[in-house]
Amino acid sequence: LGRTLEAIHRDKGVKIAVEGPPDAAFRGERQDLEEVLGNLMDNACKWAASRVHVSVAATGTDEDPHLEIRVEDDGPGLSSTEMRTALKRGMRIDEKTPGSGLGLSIVADIVGMYGGQVSLDSSQMGGLLAVIDLPAAPSE
């Protein structure tokens, strides 16, 4: 996804860094995870000045393993009011930017379907930080 989105947003010169353990595995359908990450990373690329960072960490316990996936950018970010609105279906913060306003609500729906959580916050990079918590596949 990172390479594809860098190519799509080549005109902006956005660079995407991805880090995490190579053995991290989602306990769910691959296409669902791709939909979630695709929406979050594409939003980050649209708003980033030049950088998007994606990190994955194993959380939870051996009996209940989870993945925490963080997607953040160095764009303008959102106010706390905008963050609450952004996860609602069909709500668009900026009508001038292409999109349907469904991306973040789709993310919330898919993550919720797996019993996970999604939250928005301010990134230390200056823009928006999206954090999702999803069930992980048990380590082998």
Image (cartoon, grey):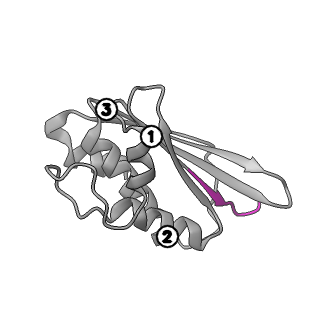
**Label 2 is placed on what type of residue?**
Asp
User: What crowding class fits label 2: few (fewer than 14 Cα within 10 Å), some (14-19), or many (20 or more)?
Assistant: some
Residue 81 versus residue 54: which sits nearer the camera?
A: 81
Which residue does the numbered mark 3 point to in the structure image? Answer: 75
Element carrying mark 3: loop
Measure the alpha-carbon separation of dots 3 and 1: 15 Å
Q: Mark 1 or 2 closer to N-term?
A: 1
Image quarter in which the C terminus is found: bottom right
Disc assigned to residue 80: 1
**Label 3 is placed on what type of residue?**
Gly
Mark 1, mark 2: which one is toward the viewer?
Answer: 1
**Which residue: 37% across, 53% down?**
1
- The span picked out in magenta is 132-139
Q: Is residue 133 magenta?
A: yes
Element carrying mark 1: helix
Which residue does the numbered mark 2 point to in the structure image? Answer: 109
Q: Is residue 128 magenta?
A: no
**Which residue: 49% across, 70% down?**
109
**Which residue: 49% across, 63% down?**
108
Residue 26 versus residue 118: which sits nearer the camera?
A: 118
Q: Mark 3 or 1 closer to N-term?
A: 3
